[in-house]
Image (cartoon, grey):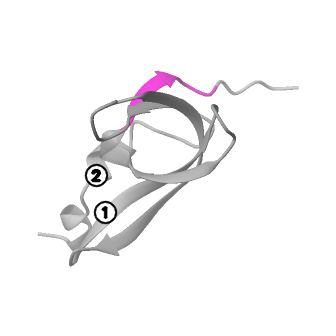
Amino acid sequence: MDKKDNVFGLKTSKKFKIGDLVSWKSFGKKKEKYFGVIIEIFERESGGRKIVYTRIVRFSDSKKVTIPIVSLKLASERKTYEI
């Protein structure tokens, strides 16, 4: 098994790209739903294994947040336009 196969969220990360509009729910009793735009996709070690994370600009307050990619749902893909 290749080391890359042990990265949690690697398969999921192939569905997303920078600029995509995504949604996710917060943990806890409220379970608020948030929307934002992916500005970075990266791997980071946590708990002894590599996990794919995203850095997102949240629409509700323009704050940058870091969330595991497996927690996201794609709301709209970024479109590429030629000029």
Indicate which disc, 1 or 2, sits on the residue closer to the N terminus. Answer: 2
Q: Residue furthest bottom?
A: 48
Give whichever of 74, 63 is nearer the camera: 63
- Give, as a three-letter code, the residue at label 1: Ile
Give whichever of 12, 30 is nearer the camera: 30
Residue name at image x 67 percent, y 38 percent:
61
For the residue labelled by badge 1, is the local secondary structure a helix, a strand or a loop?
strand
Which quadrant holds the N terminus? Answer: bottom left
Residue name at image x 20 percent, y 62 percent:
5
Report the side of 69 relative to 78 (left or right): left
Residue name at image x 41 percent, y 28 percent:
32
Whole-angstrom CA distance, mark 1 to mark 2, is 6 Å
What residue sits right under mark 1 in the picture?
51
Q: Are marks 1 and 2 in contact (CB under 8 Å)?
A: yes
76 magenta-colored: yes
Q: Which residues are magenta?
A: 72-78
- Residue 71, by quadrant, is top left
- Residue 45, by quadrant, is bottom left
- Give, as a three-letter code, the residue at label 2: Gly
62 magenta-colored: no
Report the side of 78 relative to 28 (left or right): right
Q: Residue furthest right?
A: 83
Residue name at image x 30 percent, y 53 percent:
10
Q: Residue furthest front?
A: 29
The total of numbered circles placed on residues is: 2
What residue sits right under mark 2 in the picture?
9
Q: Looking at the image, is 68 positioned above or below residue 34? A: below
For the residue labelled by badge 2, is the local secondary structure a helix, a strand or a loop?
loop
Q: Looking at the image, is 12 positioned above or below residue 82? A: below
